[in-house]
Structures are given as structure tokens and as C-alpha cells.
Amino acid sequence: MQKMNIYKTEAIVLKDYDLGEQDKIVVFYSRRYGKIRAIAKGAGNKE
């Protein structure tokens, strides 16, 4: 299993994409780190 990097910064969400039924890929931009891509587990549509 690959180690996760954890960042704490202010960022703006540029885009999000569905990844399966419950997950999303989110693209952020922050002044400190630039463009960041992350997977948000369980962030899909809850019905």
C-alpha cells in the first residue's frame, strides 16, 4: 500500500470527477502547492 501525503492548506476546487459510485477525484489549486489531485473516498452521491 502506498503512503498518503497529508496537506493542510487553503485551496479552491477546480473540478471533480466521479470515480465509481461513491468516490470522486478532486482537483484543487492552492498558492503554496499549486495544482493538487486527490481522491475523496465516500464523497459520491448519497441517495
Image: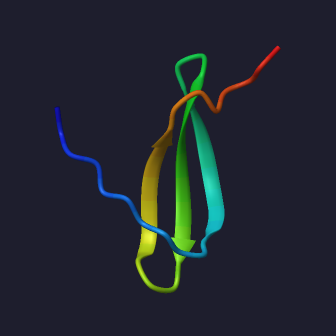
Extreme-right residue of the structure: 47
**Number of on-image labels:** 0
Q: Residue at x 66, y 27 (%)?
A: 44
Q: Position of residue 38 (x, y in %)?
A: 45, 49
Q: Is residue 18 left or right of residue 7?
A: right
Q: Position of residue 39 (x, y in %)?
A: 46, 41
The structure's colour scheme is: rainbow
Horizontal arrangement in the rendering, residue 22 relative to residue 32 (left or right): right
Considering every residue shown, the one lying at the far left of the view is 1
Where the N terminus falls, by quadrant? top left
Q: Is residue 38 above or below residue 36?
A: above
- Residue at image position (53%, 74%) is 9
* Quadrant (top left/top right/bottom left/bottom right) for the C terminus: top right
What residue do we see at 49% from left, 69% from top?
Answer: 8
Percent position (x, y) of residue 28? 55, 63
Q: Looking at this rendering, what residue extends furthest in the bottom direction? A: 31
Q: For residue 21, which quarter of the picture?
A: top right
Could you say which is closer to the camera, residue 38 or residue 10? Answer: 10
Side of 47 where 12 appears, left or right: left
Q: Who's the residue at 60% across and 75% down the image?
A: 10
